[in-house]
């Protein structure tokens, strides 16, 4: 479904200004253009089923907490993130799977800081709330920030090319 959004947003640009687009935009748009109506219908059915499972989950739980990303922060000059468990990521979205999939649920979600790694890079959590309950999600985020005491810490000043290498 991501590819379909790129088709809506970028197909005309791809056709008229391909040479001026980032490779990732071209890749995403072409993936969307290659999808058949049956592919799109199947994806929409899967998304509806996933939404139903999330509604059932929130019948029991008030909040879903996931990692904010599957990889540590990496240099903005790199196209792909570091490997995960020795597996090289095929594209830049590989490390964002856990957050990207939540967008399919139509549930409110937000990223909050929870600490720093051994190199001082920020690490975060994704908080996901019940459908149409943004207020409860914001209250949970405020509570987490208070409990962790991170508001008193200054963020790092990003400097391209200075992020420690990752394996």
Image (cartoon, rainbow, N blue to C red):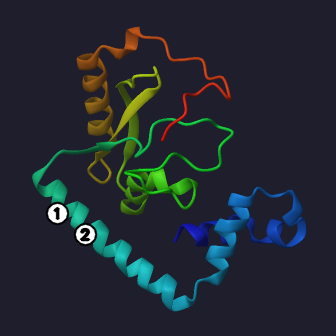
- Residue denoted by label 1: 56
Disc 2 designates what residue?
52
From the viewer's perspective, tell me whether residue 82 is left or right of residue 109: right
Near-viewer residue (18 or 79) = 79
Between the residue at mark 2 and the residue at mark 1, the CA separation in whole angstroms equals 6 Å
Question: Furthest residue to the top?
Answer: 152
Circle 1 sits in a helix, a strand or a loop, which is it? helix
Residue occupying image coordinates x 25% and y 69%: 52
Write down the quadrant of residue 134 in the picture.
top left
Seen at 47% across and 25% down, the residue is 121
Q: Residue furthest left?
A: 60
User: Which class describes the residues within 10 Å of circle 2: few (<14), some (14-19), or many (20+)?
Assistant: few
Mark 2 lies on a secondary structure that is helix
Quarter of the figure with residue 34: bottom right
Residue 22 location, x and y as percent?
A: 76, 56
Observer-nearest of 152 and 55: 152
The reply, left or right, for residue 35 in relation to residue 58 is right
Q: Residue at x 54, y 28 (%)?
A: 164
Within-10-Å neighbours for mark 1: few <14, some 14–19, many 20+: few
The location of residue 75, given as percent across then percent down, is 61, 35
Is residue 148 positioned above or below 23 on the image? above
- Residue 90's label in the rendered image is none
Question: Residue sitting at 61 percent across and 23 percent down?
Answer: 158
Contact (CB < 8 A) between labels 2 and 1? Answer: yes
Q: Which quadrant holds residue 131?
A: bottom left
Residue 14 shown left or right of residue 125 in the figure:
right
- Residue 7 percent coordinates (x, y): 68, 71
Q: Nearer the viewer, residue 95 or 41?
A: 95
Question: Height in image: 124 above or below 101?
Answer: above
Q: Pick whichever, 92 or 127, lies toward us.
A: 92
Q: Is residue 24 left or right of residue 87?
A: right
> Compared with residue 143, is residue 166 higher up or lower down, i.e. above or below?
below
């Amino acid at each position: 479904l991501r590819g379909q959004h790129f088709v809506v947003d970028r197909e005309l640009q791809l056709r008229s200004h391909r040479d001026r687009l980032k490779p990732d935009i071209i890749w995403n748009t072409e993936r969307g253009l290659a999808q058949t109506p049956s592919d799109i219908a199947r994806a929409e059915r899967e998304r509806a089923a996933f939404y139903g499972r999330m509604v059932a989950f929130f019948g029991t739980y008030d909040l879903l907490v996931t990692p904010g990303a599957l990889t540590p922060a990496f240099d903005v000059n790199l196209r792909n993130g570091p490997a995960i468990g020795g597996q090289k990521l095929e594209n830049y979205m590989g490390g964002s799977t856990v957050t990207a999939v939540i967008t399919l649920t139509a549930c409110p979600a937000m990223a909050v800081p929870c600490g720093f790694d051994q190199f001082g890079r920020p690490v975060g959590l994704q908080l996901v709330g019940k459908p149409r309950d943004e207020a409860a999600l914001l209250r949970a985020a405020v509570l987490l920030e208070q409990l962790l005491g991170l508001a008193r810490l200054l963020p790092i000043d990003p400097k391209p090319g200075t992020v420690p290498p990752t394996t």
